[in-house]
Image (spheres, rainbow, N blue to C red):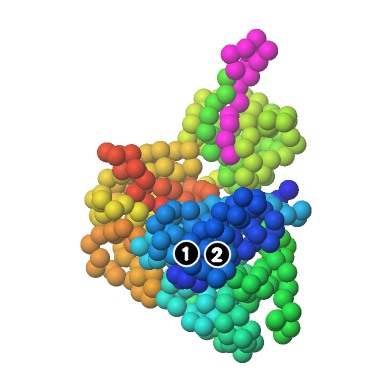
């Protein structure tokens, strides 16, 4: 069964957690004891209704303040699809949490309060969704019950957001009027919005086409582990395990190994359930080759006539995630890109991006917590990458502080630095 990963975003109090609670509740994904606990907590908080937001806001601080702080992941399924939800925070100081939660999403739901319209945080989240190249964006205009299910108000918000979205690189944009509190247009179409002829939110999530979003053109296989079983039955077995990061691979295909440049052909592609005739992203497989070649973790298999860029110099957008340090020209860090790890030095901070106004500060001396900027870096060894806009797997990386071994930044490769 196909899986859809989606992230929710939006301003504080727009109802993200309530929407997810409603999805879980109306698809009968939560257990009775969970619902009972939420009802008890709702009574203790003095609310007149069952506060479904408590299903996702698990931290005590989140419940006390009525905000989402950390990324909460929830899982549910319908007969058509499996879903992984990332409920991401709305506050500016949790930008890094949103980037983390949305980095693997196929779709993003940006909630907007129908009364307030498009706020600064709504624009920021839409921009981050476009920066992260999330293929599908849903604008859920929430709390329609508080504006009398007004078609005019829905159209106003829709037009306001569309004029902003034209500045962004958004491929697929859908607008849905909802009331998360009452369930209007969340799982079932609502009679309160007879003027709306589109799908319910769940129906859209079930039907949105995501198969062609992944890069199936450029075969990329970063080697994660070399398998050499020490048993008599498999004494001559040598396989290369990893997750396919792009394209389609089949037995008999010619491949070249980077960085050595040696060529071979694929002998077989093995999975836990046996050999397969073809494999594609994001399948985890073991590839066997016809020739004995020295291959180790961090190497990459690709097609001879379709190779990624191999370079020590990269140009990238970076989101800084560390509270204790900052990024500036001359910073020395460790980069982890696919299965390859290397030391790296920041050569230049081109600008810091104001994600609220989309303006560039070219005089910024550093990037601090939750700030995003464009940098050029030089790696100790070549990386094998594609532009992030072409392949999110081979175009993304994280930066690690070597002293503390903590992840301090996430980045998206724009290309080779000049």
Q: Which range of residues does the magenta coloring cover?
A: 229-243
Say whether disc 1 or disc 2 marks the residue closer to the N-terminus. Answer: 1
Q: Residue 238, image x and y in percent?
A: 60, 22
Nearest the eye: 375 or 99? 99
Nearest the eye: 221 or 175? 175
Q: Nearer the viewer's eye, disc 1 or disc 2?
A: 1
Relative vertical location of residue 134 with respect to residue 152 in this rendering, above or below? above
At a point 57% along the width and 77% down the height, the residue shown is 143
Nearest the eye: 111 or 316? 111
Q: Are marks 1 and 2 in contact (CB under 8 Å)?
A: yes
- Asked whether, in this view, residue 296 is left or right of residue 153, the answer is left
At a point 35% along the width and 70% down the height, the residue shown is 354
| Residue named by callout 1 | 45
Relative vertical location of residue 206 with respect to residue 263 in this rendering, above or below? below
The crowding category of the residue bearing disc 2, from other C-alpha atoms within 10 Å (few below 14, some 14 to 19, many at least 20), is many
- Asked whether, in this view, residue 391 is left or right of residue 266, the answer is left
Quarter occupied by residue 142: bottom right
Q: Which mark is residue 51?
A: 2
């Amino acid at each position: 069964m196909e899986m859809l990963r989606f992230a929710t975003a939006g301003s504080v109090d727009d109802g993200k957690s309530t929407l997810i609670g409603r999805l879980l509740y109306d698809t009968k994904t939560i257990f009775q004891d969970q619902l009972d606990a939420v009802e008890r907590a709702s009574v203790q908080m003095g609310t007149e209704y069952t506060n479904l937001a408590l299903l996702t806001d698990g931290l005590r601080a989140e419940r006390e303040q009525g905000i989402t702080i950390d990324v909460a992941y929830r899982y549910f399924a319908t007969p058509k699809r499996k879903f992984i939800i990332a409920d991401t925070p709305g506050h500016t100081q949790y930008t890094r949490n949103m980037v983390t939660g949305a980095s693997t999403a196929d779709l993003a739901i940006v909630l907007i309060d129908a009364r307030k319209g498009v706020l600064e945080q709504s624009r920021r989240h839409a921009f981050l969704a476009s920066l992260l190249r999330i293929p599908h964006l849903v604008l859920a205009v929430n709390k329609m019950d508080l504006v009398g299910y007004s078609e005019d108000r829905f159209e106003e918000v829709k037009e306001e957001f569309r004029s902003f979205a034209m500045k962004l690189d958004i491929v697929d944009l859908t607008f849905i009027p909802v009331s998360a509190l009452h369930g209007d247009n969340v799982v079932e179409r609502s009679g309160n919005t007879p003027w709306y002829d589109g799908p319910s939110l769940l129906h859209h999530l079930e039907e949105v086409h995501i198969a062609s979003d992944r890069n199936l053109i450029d075969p990329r296989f970063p080697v994660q582990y070399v398998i050499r079983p020490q048993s008599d039955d498999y004494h001559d077995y040598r396989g290369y395990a990893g997750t396919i990061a792009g394209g389609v691979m089949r037995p008999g295909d010619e491949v070249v190994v980077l960085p050595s440049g040696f060529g071979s052909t694929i002998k077989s592609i093995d999975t836990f359930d046996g050999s397969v005739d073809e494999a594609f992203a994001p399948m985890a497989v073991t590839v066997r080759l016809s020739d004995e070649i020295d291959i180790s973790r961090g190497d990459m298999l690709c097609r001879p006539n379709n190779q990624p860029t191999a370079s020590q110099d990269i140009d990238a957008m970076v989101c800084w995630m560390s509270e204790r340090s900052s990024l500036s020209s001359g910073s020395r860090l460790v980069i982890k890109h696919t299965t390859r790890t290397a030391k790296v030095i920041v050569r230049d901070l081109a600008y810091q991006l104001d994600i609220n106004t989309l303006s560039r500060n070219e005089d910024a001396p550093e990037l601090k917590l939750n700030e995003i900027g464009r940098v050029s870096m030089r790696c100790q060894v070549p990386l094998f990458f594609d532009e992030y806009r072409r392949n999110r797997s081979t175009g993304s990386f994280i930066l690690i502080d070597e002293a503390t071994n903590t992840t301090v930044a996430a980045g998206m490769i724009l290309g080779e630095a000049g």
